[in-house]
Amino acid sequence: MLMKYSRVLPLKCLGLLLPVLALISWYKPANGPGDELQVPVTYYKLPNGLKVVLSPDKTAPTIAVGVYYNIGFRIEPKNRTGFAHLFEHMMFQGSENLGKMEFIQLVQKNGGILNGSTRFDFTNYFEVMPSHKLETALWAEADRMKGLKITQDNLTNQQGVVKNEVKVNVLNQPYGGFPWLDMPQYANKNWYNSHNFYGDLADLDSAKLEDVDAFFKTFYAPNNAVLVVAGDFEIPAARKWIDQYFAKIPSSKLPPKPDLTEPPQEKEQRFTKEDALAKKPAIAISYKMPERNTPEYYAMGLIDQMLGQGQDSKLYEALVQKKGYASSVNSGINIGLGSMFDYNGPMLWTSSLIHDASVPADSIIRQYDLAVADIANNTTQEDLQLAIVKMRSGLYDAMGGMFGIGKVNLLASFALFDDDPSKINNLETSFKKVTPELIRQVAQKYLAPNNRTILIIEPKASK
């Protein structure tokens, strides 16, 4: 199971790559003011602290169930890098009433799919099943929340699986971990934001059974989780089953959250990393993001659309179409691990490309500076409106994709981090409040050279 994408269970490349399954019936076209997202949201909490979000949608006879735990790799224990990801694997190794692999078999034999992933600030598990199997999905998720089967055999087995995953996905392929795994380690200073969250092989080996047990009892508790149900179901029945299966699970005493703040960056950082498997050089440029939920944060979301998203973006036009330095440019907030909506701490806007060896890195950086200067000096209302349209389109695609899990992801994130899943219906309003002047100001402040980190990948010459 990858953190960059998702666990490959019944379908290859499920992850973030699935297209929109069907038209979504719970939003309206943008014909004027007020014609924005209208996602049904029922939100409440059980006495044990479990957050519950219910969002009925009769589009298709399926249900999507997601359980998100407020523990990601950002705050995993020191000297245990990769532990949060390792633990994600352990959650598929059996529970009180379901033996090893039986959770997976239960879902698949009932016509469903399932997956899980570890991200900066949460670990999530989900199932998509026929709508009449909602009770089955809720019972199974409650069963492993209530009691995981933690054995030395399971731990040893999954340590080997994760170590092999690190080797296959990072160590033994060209550009492995670039830039999604590499860049946070170079750009950030606080250990919680800058360690190797995929896991050092020695740290993975050193994980003990008592570490796993303590981690589960502390963080995999109802008062550190949100349960989201979306799809074709009736709210009274769902509430009944949720109370029946989850309400008696005891809460835990959660430790204080560590300080995640990053010191202000005062000058540009540049690093070079050799890659023995790479055939061409590559470059990534990252800028530290404004704080979540601020006007500047929403402005950066729209700047991302202008600068890096699509073939009409300034970077694509400059670096691919005009200069021919590369065949593509990849850009985004929380790139490779999610979106601008599903994290809760310091974050980077990152852009990267693999380019011809004849092109100096400084020539590419010059094009970035010109594109940023264009936004900082020349953004108009027309430019802003186009960015809002692109953001809206991407937002709707995200919610309709992955058989409804995209919408589950947003609801869960807003419940975990903001205690307000209905925020999903206010996103467009927040983006529409951004002005061209704010776009220019944010570009000047946050896309300045003193706020960026540059990572250059150099192919290592064979001896």
Image: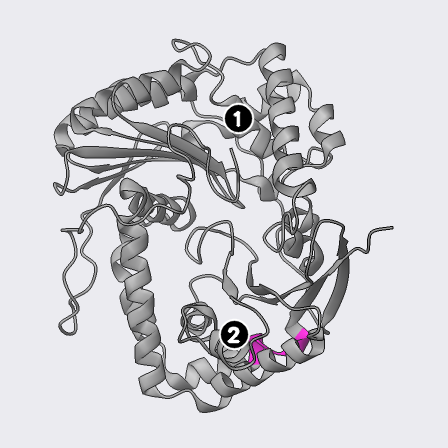
Q: Is residue 300 left or right of residue 126?
A: right
Q: Main secondary structure of the magenta part?
A: helix
Q: Residue under circle 2? A: 320
Q: Is residue 302 left or right of residue 247?
A: right
Most foreground residue, 243 or 326: 326
Give the Cα separation between the discs numbered 2 and 1.
40 Å
Reply above or below: 374 against 345.
below
Most foreground residue, 355 or 103: 355
Reply above or below: 188 against 97.
below
CB atoms at circles 2 and 1 under 8 Å apart?
A: no
User: Mark 2 or 1, which is nearer the eye?
Assistant: 2
Most foreground residue, 344 or 151: 151
Percent of width and height locating residue 112: 28, 27
Q: Residues within 10 Å of mark 1 (few under 14, many from 20)?
A: many
**Highlighted range, magenta:** 445-450
Q: Amino acid at mark 1?
A: His
Percent of width and height locating residue 433: 32, 75
Q: Is residue 286 left or right of residue 2?
A: right
Reply above or below: 220 against 395.
above
Residue located 64% across and 23% down the image: 159
Q: Residue furthest front?
A: 463
Percent of width and height locating residue 318: 52, 80
Q: Mark 1: which secondary structure?
A: helix
Q: Residue 21's quadrant in the figure?
A: top left
Q: Residues within 10 Å of mark 2 (few under 14, many from 20)?
A: some
Q: Mark 2: which secondary structure?
A: helix
Q: Amino acid at mark 2?
A: Val
Q: Residue under circle 1? A: 89
Residue located 27% across and 41% down the image: 403
The disc placed on residue 368 is none
